Image (tube, grey):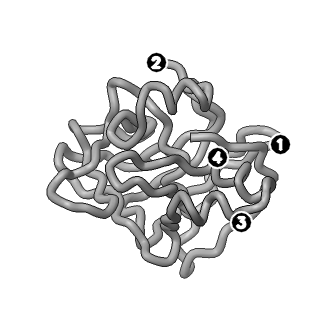
């Protein structure tokens, strides 16, 4: 997903924060655990798109990696989206997506928004859950970027509109 430039900063997280190596003057890399993400991770430059979410520990096939947060996962109807002002719509379009199966606009306010698209994804939605419930597709080594095939929740046309290439 999309990300802008990040200045060096520390994000508090119940004392579990550990800062990792800097990516340069205009970007920092962070590593910490939180309730929605069920593994140690870091944000860093991605060869796919801007900033990506990388595991900082080995993960096993089928391992639960992410669950939705009712406070940080926002779903709005098309009618609610249409009522937003243009600036708010741009934010939803930049950080969120229209979920075809639910017919709702969805925006994450946690680091899952840094899971970039790939047809050879490392994570997938567990279809036995309606809410976001991401699991590892295969064993994943520490340092690998986590990716998801966005066609699980968007169309090819939606991806093209957002400039996301195969």
- The location of residue 64, given as percent across then percent down, is 25, 57
- Residue at the limit of the structure toward the right, as seen here: 25
The answer to which quarter of the image holds residue 145 is: top left
Name the N-terminal-most of marks 1 and 3: 3
Which residue is under mark 4?
Answer: 93
Dot 2: element? loop
Which residue is under mark 2?
Answer: 166
Q: CA distance from mark 2 to mark 4?
A: 19 Å
- The location of residue 136, given as percent across then percent down, is 26, 45
Please identify the quadrant where the N terminus is shown. Answer: top right
Name the N-terminal-most of marks 1 and 2: 1
Name the N-terminal-most of marks 2 and 4: 4
In the displayed structure, 125 sits above or below 34; it is: above
In the displayed structure, 61 sits above or below 50; it is: below
Mark 3 and mark 2 in contact? Answer it, CB < 8 Å. no
8 or 164: nearer the viewer: 164
Mark 1, Cα crowd under 10 Å, few <14 / some 14-19 / many 20+, is few
Q: CA distance from mark 4 to mark 3?
A: 27 Å
Q: CA distance from mark 3 to mark 2?
A: 34 Å
Dot 1: element? loop
- Disc number at residue 10? 3
In the displayed structure, 105 sits above or below 139; it is: below
The residue lying at 58 percent from left, 47 percent from top is 43
Which residue is under mark 1?
Answer: 26
Name the N-terminal-most of marks 4 and 1: 1
Mark 4 and mark 1 in contact? Answer it, CB < 8 Å. no
For discs 4 and 3, the disc positioned in front in the rendered view: 4
- Residue at the limit of the structure toward the top, as seen here: 166
């Amino acid at each position: 997903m999309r990300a802008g430039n990040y200045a060096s900063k520390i994000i508090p997280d119940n004392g579990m924060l550990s800062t990792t190596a800097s990516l340069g003057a205009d970007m920092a890399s962070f590593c910490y655990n939180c309730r929605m993400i069920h593994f140690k991770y870091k944000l860093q430059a991605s060869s796919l798109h801007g900033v990506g979410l990388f595991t900082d520990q080995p993960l096993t096939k089928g391992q639960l990696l992410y669950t939705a947060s009712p406070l940080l996962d926002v779903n709005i109807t098309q009618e609610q989206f249409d009522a937003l002002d243009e600036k708010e719509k741009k934010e939803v379009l930049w950080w969120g997506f229209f979920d075809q199966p639910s017919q709702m606009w969805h925006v994450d306010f946690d680091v899952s928004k840094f899971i970039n698209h790939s047809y050879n994804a490392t994570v997938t939605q567990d279809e036995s859950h309606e809410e976001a419930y991401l699991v590892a597709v295969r064993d994943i080594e520490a340092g690998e970027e986590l990716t998801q095939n966005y066609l699980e929740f968007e169309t090819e046309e939606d991806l093209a509109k957002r400039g996301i290439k195969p």
